[in-house]
Image (cartoon, rainbow, N blue to C red):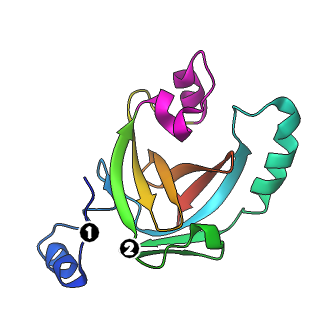
Amino acid sequence: MIVRVRPLWLAVLVLLGGGWPDARAAGMSLLGTWQIVEAQPGPWLAQNQQAAYAAEGKRMLKLAITFAPQQVKSKYKALNCTSSVIYEPNSLEADALFQGNLPEPNPSAAAQRMGFAKGEVPGVDVKCVNASYTFHFRDANTVLFNMNSVIYTLKRQ
């Protein structure tokens, strides 16, 4: 379900204790400031591609990303969304994480090696005019997402 909230209604929801309905997944909120603390090449990449993707990810370390009700801001333009951001909660099985790219024959084992618990993983799809990303919660203060075959780990600041 996609939820768009206008500023007045948003204030009413917050005052009534409704919180931010569009940026939560299984009780975990994406709203706030996060920092990229780790970047790893996707485990689906060939061994000879790992070094190039590791270098790309290293450049993004320490990048801060702020998720607000109506925008996403960072110094990296591809992640910015200045209007009409849509947060859509989801819950995915291990074989669907990172666009279904975890290695076979056992994507669940790969997900567990990445720190995810067994079963469905809560997440939030963030949709903007210029891009769409899925953030998977490892826990309430840690999310992972895939961009350009690099898996980034963000920690809440």
Residue 92 lies, with reference to residue 69, above or below; the image says: above
Residue type (three-letter) at the residue carrying disc 1? Arg
Residue 64 % position (x, y): 60, 71
In this view, the residue farthest toward the front is 129
State yes or no: discs 1 and 2 in contact (Cβ < 8 Å): yes
Residue 86 % position (x, y): 36, 64
Q: Is residue 17 left or right of residue 138?
A: left
Secondary structure mainly formed by the magenta segment: helix
Residue type (three-letter) at the residue carrying disc 2? Ser
Q: Give the extent of the magenta segment.
A: 93-114
Question: Do we see residue 116 in this rendering?
Answer: no
Residue 102 lies, with reference to residue 81, above or below; the image says: above
Name which of mark 1 and mark 2 comes first in the sequence: 1
Q: Is residue 62 magenta?
A: no
Residue, disc 2: 84
Residue at (48% x, 51% y) in the render: 135
Quadrant position of residue 101: top right
Q: Nearer the viewer, residue 51 or 143?
A: 51
Q: Is residue 122 left or right of residue 2?
A: right
Residue 14 lies, with reference to residue 94, above or below; the image says: below
Residue, disc 1: 4
Quadrant position of residue 18: bottom left
Residue at (46% x, 66% y) in the render: 128
Q: Is residue 104 magenta?
A: yes
Residue 26 % position (x, y): 30, 47
Q: Which mark is residue 65?
A: none
